[in-house]
Image: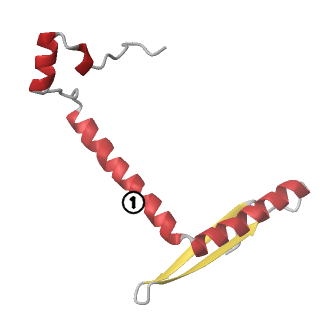
Amino acid sequence: MKLPKNNINIRISIDQDTDHCDINVNHNLSTTMTEEQFTFYVDVIAGLNAKLRTELNSFSHMGSLLREVAILREIIDENDSEISFEPEEEFKEAIRKNDTAKILEFKKKLH
């Protein structure tokens, strides 16, 4: 199948029995691109190919982190409540005694 002009195609074929994957990157860059553009995209293709072949585990790790962020975002959105704060007895006692050595003061506005 011929690629449309100025397209880059990345194909990863997986053999689930051997856990081997074959990575193919091809392109159909326009011959009317400037030399700088053409060189840039050819270098991008070479870099993508090299990264995919040597750092597939890194991509998987990044994907798992993004999945966790999405899960946590859902949890936050579902709860959509304010964080509750239950002060320790030591803190309550320090306030009662006006013991400022044990209390950190935070400014309401930082700018």
Number of dots carrying numbers: 1
Residue 18 lies left or right of residue 44; in this view the side is left
Colour mode of the rendering = secondary structure
In this view, 95 is above or below 73 = above
Q: Is residue 27 visible?
A: yes
* Viewer-nearest residue: 58 or 18: 58
Badge 1 density bin: few <14, some 14–19, many ≥20, Cα 10 Å: few
Residue visible at 76% across and 67% down in the picture: 28
Residue 5 lies left or right of residue 22; in this view the side is right
Residue visible at 49% across and 14% down in the picture: 111
Q: Residue 48, position in %: x, y?
A: 65, 66
Q: Amino acid at mark 1?
A: Ser
In this view, 48 is above or below 18 = above
Q: Is residue 4 visible?
A: no
Q: Residue 98, position in %: x, y?
A: 18, 10
Residue 89 lies left or right of residue 76; in this view the side is left
In this view, 65 is above or below 76 = below
* Viewer-nearest residue: 52 or 91: 91
- Helix, strand or loop at mark 1: helix
Residue visible at 63% across and 77% down in the picture: 24
